[in-house]
Image (spheres, helix red, strand yellow):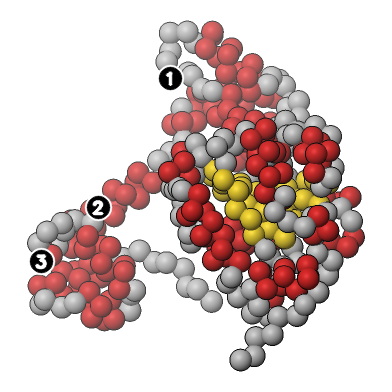
Amino acid sequence: MNTPYKRLSLAEREEISKGIYAREKSAYIAARLKRHPSTITREIKLQVKRRRWCYSAHKGQEQAVEHRKKSGRPKKLEENPQLLLYIQDKLRQEWSPEEIAKRVKLEYANDPTMRISHESIYQYLYCLPKGELKKELMQGLRRERKMRLSRFALHSRRSGITDIISISERPAETEGRAVPGHWEGDLIVGKGHKSAIGTLVERTTRLTLLVPLKEKDAMSVRKAFAAAFKRIPKKMVKTLTYDRGTEMAEHKLFSKETKIQVYFADPYSPWQRGTNENTNGLIRQYFPKGTDFNEVSLASIKKAEGRLNSRPRKALGYYTPAEKFYSLTTGQEIALEV
């Protein structure tokens, strides 16, 4: 069981100062104080840039106190009781947060301290501890939710995809992985969200296709995925399960052209495409975050794909995806014995 972190005390900082003066290593100081060495190193680096011996225990304590003051900065409503009382009064009158935010600006036109956004009022309400006050103030809200989402989160939830077929309607044979031909798909987005590559993974064999993309719009993704699946025998491509990314908005046309039925996972449920998610983690070893895929050559993508498919997997009994896929498509078993 992990013990909770305890901040360094002034006495401990004085011991650090003594240790530095005696030219002890950080590990020795940490052992004496029963602290992790990184705790000591981090503390020293907060005020010592070049000369390690210039550490001051009292300066370190002052920095820690100042940091706690800043991190515990009070909210606007805690500093302005007049504004807080105004908001509480209007909420009891069943005014909406937006109505309150606009009205207070009119009533106190010459008082800049009486200003607040309706988002801040919502945050105040939803952060209140459970009790009679919270229950009373929230009664007037048009819709009572357990939490308040930001505008960005709300917009991101709007799918923009029509005629979705849910993962719940996917054939039962996909669940056990015994029947091959069921794939999962995704995009790995590059630097600044300006580039991407497609990833397609077969659930039974873990065979992976890396799909270069000139653009990451729906039409480009549809055409690129369709071209990628042409490399695979038709009997090994039956379904594709995708998340709700708008790049799959042309799924109906994709299915019509390829005869591959597309199913969509539930929102915020990456475990429903666990094979793809795990494979994306392996792909990141070759293309780490911050990669600009517009600058990655086709040869580099094909090389990474080849390495992924020739890499033994624990889930496959340490056979490779390529070996398993070959066995299933040809009916011939791979013999590893020399």
Camera-near label (2 vs 3) is 3
Decide: marks 1, 3 in contact (CB < 8 A)? no
Residue lying at 67% horizontally and 49% vertically, measured from the top left: 228
On residue 53, which mark appears?
A: 3
Q: Earlier in the sequence, mark 2 or mark 3?
A: 3
Camera-near label (2 vs 1) is 2
Q: Earlier in the sequence, mark 2 or mark 1?
A: 2
The amino acid at mark 2 is: Gln
Per the model, the C-alpha gap separating discs 2 and 1 is 31 Å
On residue 113, which mark appears?
A: 1
Q: Is residue 111 visible?
A: yes
Camera-near label (1 vs 3) is 3
The amino acid at mark 1 is: Thr
Per the model, the C-alpha gap separating discs 1 and 3 is 47 Å
Q: Position of residue 35 (x, y in %)?
A: 33, 75
Decide: marks 2, 3 in contact (CB < 8 A)? no
Residue lying at 61% horizontally and 91% vertically, measured from the top left: 338
Q: In the orientation shown, which residue stands out farthest toward the bottom?
A: 338
- Quadrant of the image occupied by residue 158: top right
On residue 177, which mark appears?
A: none
Q: Position of residue 277 (x, y in %)?
A: 64, 57
- Quadrant of the image occupied by residue 112: top left
Residue in the foreground of this view, choosing between 28 and 165: 165
Residue in the foreground of this view, choosing between 155 and 221: 221
Residue in the foreground of this view, choosing between 50 and 34: 50
Label 2 SS:
helix
Q: Is residue 269 visible?
A: no
Per the model, the C-alpha gap separating discs 2 and 3 is 18 Å
- Circle 2 sits on which residue? 63
**Tag 1: Cα neighbours inside 10 Å, few (<14), some, or many (≥20)?**
few
